[in-house]
Image (cartoon, rainbow, N blue to C red):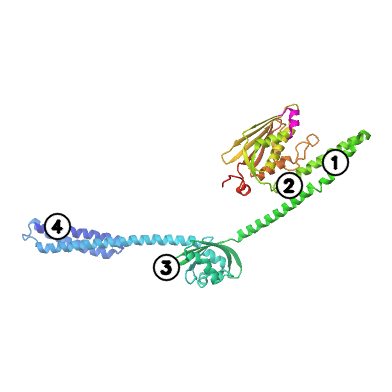
Amino acid sequence: MIALFILSTSICFQFITAILALRLIKITCNRWSWILISSAIILMGVRRCITLFRFLTGETSQPPDSVAEGVALLISGLMMVGVYQIHNYFQQINSAEEERQKTELLLARFGRILDNSFNEIYIFDGETLKFTQVNSGARNNLNYSMEELTHLTPLDLKPGYTQDDFEELIAPLKSGQKPLVVFETMHQRKDGTCYPVEIRLQWMKEESPPIFVAIIQDIAKRKKDEQRLSDYAEELKRSNKELEDFAFIASHDLQEPLRKIITFGDLIQEQEAGLDEQNRNYLTKMRKATLRMKNLIEDLLHYSQINTEQAPYELVDLEKKVASACEEFERVILTTQAVIHTENLPLIEGNKSQLQQLFTNLIGNSLKYSQAGKAPVINILGRKKEDGYWEINVEDNGIGFDEKYTELIFQPFQRLHGKSKYEGSGIGLSICKKIVDHHKGTLSVTSKPGEGTTFTITLPAQQPLAVVAHLPNRKP
C-alpha cells in the first residue's frame, strides 16, 4: 500500500510539473522548449499511470518496488520544485522588466518635457564643470549643438566671469549653506550676442558623480518692461515736479495780480457814491469775476497738491470732519432750513485736511443743487464692509441729474448746469475723486433727475504701512 501511495503521489507531482512547464511558455515566450519538456514529463506520468493501472486491475501480481518508487517520487518532487522555482524566477524577471519599461517611458516623457521646456536647463559636471546635458530650449537660444556644448563650461557662456568668480558663487552650495542660488547675469550666444538671464542653480551631491543643475529663464522681455517702468517713473517724477512748479506759480505769481485787482476794486468801491449806475454795475461784475478767478486758482492748487502733499496720515474722525464742514455752511443751512443727518461714521487712517475737503465739497454740492422751495435733506451714513473697507453714502434730495453724465461730472471744469445759475469752478467733484483715489478708495454716484443724488465712497480703514508707519500702536 505504501508503494501505491508513493506511486500515486509521484504521478501527481509529474502532472503538476507539466502544468507549470506549460505556463512557462507564456512567461518566457520560449514555446517549443517548454512544450518538449512538458511533453516529456507528461509521458513519464503516463508511463507511471500504466504501471499503476496494471497493478490495480490485476494484470500483474508483482507490486511496485517501494524503494524504486520512493526514488522516483523524490525525482518528481525535485522536478516540480525546480520548475516552480524557474516559474517564479521568470515571473520576477518579467515584473522587473515591466517596471523597467514603465520607468524608461516615464524618464523618456520627463526628458521630453524638460527638453521642450521654454526655460533653459543645463546639467554640468561638479568637478570639470563641463556640460553633460542641455535641453533644446537652451541649445536653440545659444545656437550651439549638444556636441559643442559638451566641450564648454558655464564660464564660456558668461562674459566677464572668471574661475574665481564662479567658485565664490557656488561655494554656499557646496558647503551646504544654501540649497539654491539665484542670480542674474548675461549669456553669450555662439555669434557673440548676449541676452539677460535669471539663473536658479542647485548642487546635486547625491548623484554619482555630483552634478550642478541650472534652470535659466531668458529675462530680456522682463528687463525691457522694467526699463519701460523706470522710464515711466522718471517721466511721472518729472511731471510731478512740473506740477509742483505750477502749483507754486498758481499760489504766488498768478494770485498776486488778482490781489491787486481786488485791492483796487475795494478802493474804487469806497468811492462808489461818485459812480453812476453803469459804472457801479461794471465794478460789481469785475469784483465777481475776480473772486471767481481767485477761487478757480485756489481749487486748481488744491487739485494739483492732492498726490504731492506730504502731510502724514493719521487717525481721522469722519464725524468731526462732517461737523466742521457743516460749520462752514452754517449760514446756508440756516437760510435753507437744511437737515443734515449722520450715522455710524468711522475713524479711519488718512490725510485729515484732504478728508475735510472731501466732505466740504460733497455737502456744498448737495446744498448748491437743492430743489427750489424744498428744504435740503442730506444723509451721511457709514457701513463697515467685510473686506476692511468702510462704505459711506452721502444722499440728498436735490435736483439730481441724468446718469449718462456720470463720468462727466468727475472731470475738471465739466458742468451740467450753467455757471450763471450755479456758481463754482467746476472742479469740486474732481477734487473729491482724486482725494478718494489717493486714499486707495473708490467714489461712485447714482442719481435721477428730480429725485436726488447719492455719492458712495469706499475707504480702507487702514492705509498701507508705508504711509502710516508713524502711527502709535499700529501693528503689521
Q: Classify 233 as above or below 375.
A: below
Q: Dot 3: what SS?
A: loop
Q: Dot 2: what SS?
A: helix
Q: CA distance from mark 4 to mark 3?
A: 59 Å
Q: Nearer the viewer, mark 3 or mark 1?
A: 1
**Res 27 → quadrant:** bottom left
Which residues make up the magenta segment? 328-338
Q: Nearer the viewer, mark 4 or mark 3?
A: 3
Q: Which mark is residue 8?
A: 4
- Where does the image place residue 306, in percent across and percent down from the top left? 70, 46
Q: Which mark is residue 262?
A: 1
Q: Earlier in the sequence, mark 4 or mark 2?
A: 4
Whether residue 401 is visible to the viewer of this picture, yes or no, is: no
In this view, the residue in front, 454 or 287, is 287
Label 1 neighbour load within 10 Å: few <14, some 14-19, many 20+:
some
| Kind of residue indicated by mark 4 | Ser
Q: Earlier in the sequence, mark 1 or mark 2?
A: 1
Q: Which residue is mark 2?
A: 304
